[in-house]
Image (spheres, rainbow, N blue to C red):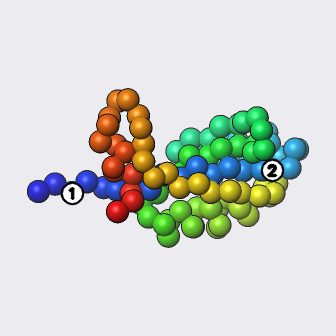
């Protein structure tokens, strides 16, 4: 019997000081647990896609590694519940929510 590793996916909306946007993009991307980082329009300056094994790891990434970065004003975390990607229909049930 094979064991499938579960991964929790979260979308972290990040607001930062205007002068910090340039340097924060690379710093966010280099943070362990962060899979992707996008600059955005709207109420958030960045959206980071975080993929970690469990809630404790998510809390560590957000509170200890990202929220305390100089220039970060606020974060807002949204956990994924189900995926509706076209390439793998079963992925929606394997995002870490039991």
The kind of secondary structure element at disc 2 is strand
Q: Quadrant of residue 72?
A: bottom right
Answer few, some or many: residues within 10 Å of disc 1's Cα (few below 14, many 20 plus, some between 14 and 19): few
| Residue at image location 16% in from the left, 54% down from the top | 2
Residue 48 relative to residue 15: left or right: left
Q: Residue shown at 68%/49% (left/top)?
A: 13
Q: What residue did someone put label 2 on?
A: 16
Toward the viewer: 11 or 17?
11
Vertical side of 75 occupied by 19: above or below: above
Residue 3 numbered tag:
1
Asked whether the beta carbons under mark 2 and mark 1 sit within 8 Å of each other, the answer is no
| Secondary-structure class at tag 1 | loop
Toward the left, the furthest residue is: 1
Q: Nearer the viewer, residue 44 or 21?
A: 44
Task: Say whether residue 91 is left or right of residue 21.
Answer: left
User: Residue 73, how many percent across, how many down?
Assistant: 81, 57
Residue 67 placement, left or right of 84: right
Q: Is residue 34 shown to the viewer in this render?
A: no
Quick check: can you spot residue 52? yes
Whole-percent x and y of residue 60?
A: 57, 67
Left or right: 19 with respect to 85?
A: right
Q: Distance between the residues labelled 2 and 1?
A: 40 Å
Q: Where is residue 76 in the image (x, y as percent from the top left)?
A: 68, 56
Answer few, some or many: residues within 10 Å of disc 2's Cα (few below 14, many 20 plus, some between 14 and 19).
some
Q: Nearer the viewer, residue 21 or 4?
A: 4
Which of the numbered marks, if any, corresponds to residue 78? none
On the rendered image, what quadrant is the N terminus found in? bottom left
Mark 2 vs mark 1: which is more N-terminal?
Answer: 1
């Amino acid at each position: 019997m094979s064991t499938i590793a579960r991964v929790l996916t979260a979308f972290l909306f990040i607001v930062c000081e205007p002068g910090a946007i340039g340097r924060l993009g690379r710093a966010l991307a280099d943070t362990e647990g962060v899979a992707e980082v996008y600059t955005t329009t709207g109420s958030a300056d960045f959206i980071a896609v975080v993929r970690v094994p469990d809630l404790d790891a998510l809390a560590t990434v957000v509170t200890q590694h990202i929220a305390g970065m100089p220039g970060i004003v606020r974060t807002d975390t949204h956990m994924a519940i189900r995926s509706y990607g076209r390439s793998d229909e079963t992925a929606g049930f394997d995002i870490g929510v039991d």
